[in-house]
């Protein structure tokens, strides 16, 4: 009887640790595979750009948007920075721009279709820091492949309660 | 014997302690809720109370509102099979009625959206709080919360709630025509007219960015926008000068099944 109980406890502990280990691994797994372009947020922010320099619609629209590849090419042509990485990537980007295509960046931050999230509401009206959801990108050197913080309703509501803004379901659900 | 007496005493003591702490917790959380509510109320100066007036003397029964509602809210295309099974989803329906006797017979078509009752019969029956009346008087349906029990569908005396019996499908090019502001409801949830509340979210955001409060006409549902006869008025019923509340005071006014005491916020106007 006692042995059986011990076995049961051991099994439960094993199952628990396996579950947590798997969850831990899942939380480190990339959520998107980005194109092979070594985009570096840290360098761009250190050069004095702000988030809305490139993600221009964040202040006025629902979606923050990704800059067009022509923006990258034009800006780099104007600034004229020369680095080994840029010498390699620059011509690639120019080719993409010449073909009239875009860099196929994958969207990492995505709210489900039944929820309404507007960048304008949070960035311009509420004056929130982008880092609140997107993390501190001034330290990020590789393309973003996972969410800095999970986009869960719990997180939305926690913040809404803290700031004493509406928690009415209809304010976001649609 | 002694063991039993001890356990009974300790059980009673524990039960009492649990009940007391539960009562205390509920009181505390209620107090906290009221504290939390106060600043939110201060932000929205006065909650609106949205309502609609439909003038049946103006309505021609053209069904533009039905089509607009269908396109605006990503409703699945009605199929003959769905029609035969009585499973058509149509948030804005036309209720036909025949009045008078031959030779003075008159056919009337009455547009019926969700009545957004002030005392909705559909909300108290929801076991998961997926449908509720929000502070602005809109009767909401939160799709990811809905478990599809259909209690609310049966409770609605106006048959304005629709259940998704199957996954909604559209013919190929129409899949790309969905309104991005409205979610596509999955199979197994109930849906209903929302008074196009996604337009309210947008209107509020626009007004806030312009640094002003909502004005009359900022928030207009799709059915009212397209009505060629201008038979539909929509607005804040608590605002005495809004078109909806002015028309709503007309002597021609009537409510659908008023005797049920649901206090609908859709008023009908018709010469008796």
Image (cartoon, helix red, strand yellow):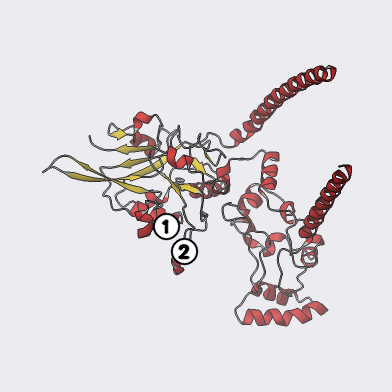
Residue under label 2? B177
Q: Is residue B254 above or below residue B113?
A: above
| Residue at position x 71%, y 63% in the image | A31
A8 relative position to B187: left or right: right
Disc 2 vs disc 1: Cβ atoms closer than 8 Å? yes
| Residue at position x 74%, y 19% in the image | B16
Classify the position of the C terminus of chain B by image quarter: top left
Is disc 2 placed on a helix, strand or loop?
A: helix
Report in which chain the residue with disc 2 lies.
B
Is disc 1 placed on a helix, strand or loop?
A: helix
| Residue at position x 70%, y 44% in the image | A159
Tell me where residue A95 appears, x and y as whole percent: 66, 82
The disc placed on residue B71 is 1
Q: Tell me if I can see residue B218 in this picture.
A: no
Of labels 2 and 1, earlier in sequence is: 1
Tell me where residue A49 appears, x and y as whole percent: 74, 63
């Amino acid at each position: 009887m006692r042995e059986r109980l011990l076995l049961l406890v051991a099994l439960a502990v094993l199952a628990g640790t396996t579950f947590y280990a798997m969850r831990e691994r899942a939380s480190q797994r990339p959520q998107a595979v980005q194109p092979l372009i070594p985009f570096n947020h840290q360098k761009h922010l250190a050069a004095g750009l702000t988030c809305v320099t490139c993600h221009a619609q964040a202040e006025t629209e629902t979606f923050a948007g990704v800059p067009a590849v022509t923006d990258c090419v034009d800006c780099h042509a104007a600034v004229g920075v020369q680095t080994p990485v840029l010498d390699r990537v620059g011509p690639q980007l120019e080719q993409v721009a010449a073909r009239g295509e875009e860099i196929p960046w994958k969207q990492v931050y995505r709210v489900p279709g039944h929820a309404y999230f507007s960048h304008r509401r949070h960035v311009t009206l509420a004056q929130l820091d982008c880092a609140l959801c997107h993390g501190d990108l001034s330290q990020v050197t590789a393309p973003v492949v996972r969410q800095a913080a999970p986009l869960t309703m719990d997180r939305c509501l926690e913040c809404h309660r803290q700031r004493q803004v509406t928690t009415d379901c209809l304010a976001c659900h649609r | 014997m002694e063991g039993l007496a001890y356990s009974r005493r300790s059980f009673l003591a524990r039960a009492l302690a649990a009940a007391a702490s539960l009562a205390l917790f509920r009181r505390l959380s209620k107090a906290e809720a009221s504290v939390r509510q106060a600043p939110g109320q201060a932000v929205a100066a006065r909650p609106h109370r949205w309502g609609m007036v439909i003038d049946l003397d103006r309505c021609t029964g053209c069904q533009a509102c039905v089509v607009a509602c269908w396109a605006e809210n990503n409703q699945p295309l009605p199929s003959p099979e769905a029609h035969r099974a009585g499973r058509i989803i149509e948030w804005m329906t036309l209720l036909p009625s025949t009045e008078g006797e031959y030779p003075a017979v008159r056919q009337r078509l009455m547009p019926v959206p969700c009545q957004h009752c002030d005392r909705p019969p559909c909300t108290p029956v929801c076991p998961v709080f997926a449908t509720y009346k929000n502070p602005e008087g809109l009767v909401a349906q939160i799709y990811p919360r809905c478990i599809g029990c259909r209690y609310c569908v049966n409770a609605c005396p106006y048959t304005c709630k629709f259940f998704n019996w199957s996954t909604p499908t559209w013919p190929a090019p129409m899949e790309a025509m969905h309104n991005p502001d409205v979610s596509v409801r999955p199979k197994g949830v109930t849906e209903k007219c929302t008074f196009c509340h996604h337009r309210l979210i947008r209107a509020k955001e626009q007004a806030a960015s312009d640094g002003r409060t909502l004005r009359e006409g900022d928030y207009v549902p799709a059915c009212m926008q397209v009505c060629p006869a201008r038979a539909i008025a929509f607005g804040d019923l608590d605002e005495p000068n809004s078109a909806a509340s002015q028309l709503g005071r007309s002597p021609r006014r009537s409510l659908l099944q008023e005797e049920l005491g649901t206090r609908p916020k859709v008023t009908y106007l018709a010469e008796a």
